[in-house]
Amino acid sequence: MITGVIKNNARTGSTLIVTLPCNLYDLRDHLASIGITSEASKLTVGGTENIKVQLAAEEPVGELVLSKLAQDDTLTGLNVACQEIRKNCPYGYEEFMDMLSPKKDVLRDRFHFYQQYCTTPPSTATGVKYLIEEADRYRITMENYTRACKAAEDEEYELPEDDGWER
């Protein structure tokens, strides 16, 4: 989803290339491999004086994620947001991206169909918190849609009521 190039200038320019999302422990170990011993939860996506962070998207959803980040968001927060988005979008990211950035042409907006199943308002947060809350809103919407489909299917195939005949 996102590639991070992290350079530790305090340690003679050691460089790390990491793909997010990844296991939180792996992220910690990767950072330690280039001499970054501070917690990833304290390292902002903008880097520090000695640690340069460059983030690039590998796909459109990654570009959208990067566009929503705040300067004070951390690498751990970004990693968690990417994990949540991946977990809540197992079949692709198109509807999720349309939910965050609706298309003007309703016929091309894949989320428009699911809009009626969305029971929670859009997040008013910013940065990583926004992304996590919106991933959760998307999950709830898809669960509501699934329940509605199941209910319609059950109703369609419901056995007729007992009409007095013995079986």
Image (cartoon, rainbow, N blue to C red):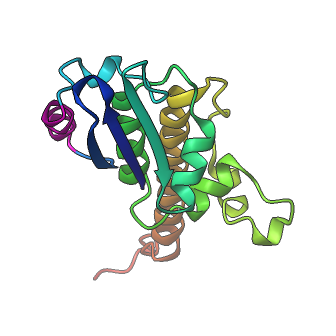
Q: Residue at x 41, y 25 (%)?
A: 74
Tell whether position 157 is magenta.
no
Residue located 73% across and 60% down the image: 112
Q: Position of residue 140 (x, y in %)?
A: 50, 44
Q: Which residues are magenta?
A: 23-34
Rendered position, 163 above or below 83: below
Q: Residue furthest front?
A: 12
Q: Magenta region's main secondary structure?
A: helix
Q: Nearest the camera: 32 or 111?
A: 32
Q: Residue at x 19, y 34 (%)?
A: 34
- On the image, the x and y values in percent for residue 142 come to 51, 54
Q: Depth check: 93 or 162 in front?
A: 93
Relative side of 60 to 167, left or right: right
**Figure check: 91 above or below 102:** below
Q: Quadrant of the N terminus?
A: bottom left
Queried whether the magenta region covers residue 29, the answer comes back as yes
Indicate left or right for 57 with 82 as reference.
right
Q: Position of residue 111 (x, y in %)?
A: 67, 59
- Tag count in the figure? 0
**Residue 163: x %, y % from top left:** 45, 75
Locate the C terminus and report the quarter of the image it occupies: bottom left
Q: Residue at x 39, y 51 (%)?
A: 3
